[in-house]
Image (cartoon, rainbow, N blue to C red):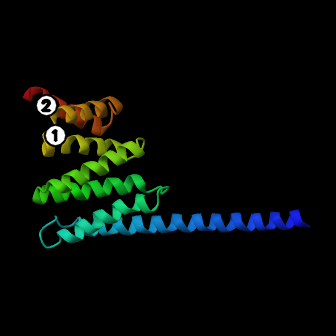
Amino acid sequence: MRSSLHSIILALSLAVLAGGAGAADRQDGHLYLSAQKEYEILGKSRPAAGNRPRWEKLAERFERLPQDFPKTSYGDGAHYYAARIYQELYQSAKEERTLDLAIKNLRALLLKYPRSPFAAEGRYRLAAALEEGKGDLAEARRQYALLAEKSPQAEWGAKARARLDVLDRKT
């Protein structure tokens, strides 16, 4: 009797835990899709003084997702979109802080999700940020070369090779 009671309690506990995990999955998915929808809306206009705080809050929403839900399946996209937003903000105002945040998110994407569908573009964006924003041509070249090597036939690999050619002509 006692072991069957323990079995029932164990089964109920596992069911509650499984249900909780499903709820967390739904919550992180909802937060990600909501942020993505906001990105689409904001994407119709460039960051400007008037809407800059809204762009920054959206980037922060994306950044919080993998922090609040470490096992989320949306972590790669969250880092990718946060980085894109910070790069847009950097392009509009040339604030070093936003470039640093873009680089931080791109590095997190590549470190935590190297096989992500966002990884190739993320590496290209990282290399471009290092080249154009930081002036770190050696590290940019390394990132472009790595991308060209990993994705020789893909669009981002071709773009990386083209940037390498440009950098080679400059030196």
User: Which of the 4 image quadrants contains residue 62?
Assistant: bottom left
Residue at 76% x, 64% y: name it: 11
Q: Residues within 10 Å of mark 1 (few under 14, many from 20)?
A: many
For residue 116, above or below residue 84: above
Amino acid type shown at disc 1: Glu
Residue beneath disc 1: 131
For residue 111, above or below residue 8: above
Q: Horizontal and vertical percent for residue 44?
A: 21, 67
Determine the residue located farthest toward the right in the rendered image.
Answer: 1
Q: Horizontal and vertical percent for residue 83?
A: 27, 54
Nearer to us: label 1 or label 2: 1
User: Whole-Å distance between the Cαs marked 1 and 2?
Assistant: 9 Å
Residue at 38% x, 43% y: name it: 111
Depth check, front residue: 168 or 3 = 3
Residue at 82% x, 65% y: name it: 6
Q: Horizontal and vertical percent for residue 160?
A: 23, 35
Q: Secondary structure at mark 1?
A: helix
Q: Quadrant of the N terminus?
A: bottom right
Q: Horizontal and vertical percent for residue 140?
A: 20, 36
| Cβ atoms under marks 1 and 2 closer than 8 Å | yes
| Horizontal arrangement in the rendering, residue 73 relative to residue 5 (left or right) | left
Q: Quadrant of the C terminus?
A: top left
Q: Secondary structure at mark 2?
A: helix
Amino acid type shown at disc 2: Leu
Residue beneath disc 2: 167
Depth check, front residue: 43 or 107 = 107
Residue at 14% x, 46% y: name it: 133
Determine the residue located farthest toward the left in the rendered image.
Answer: 170
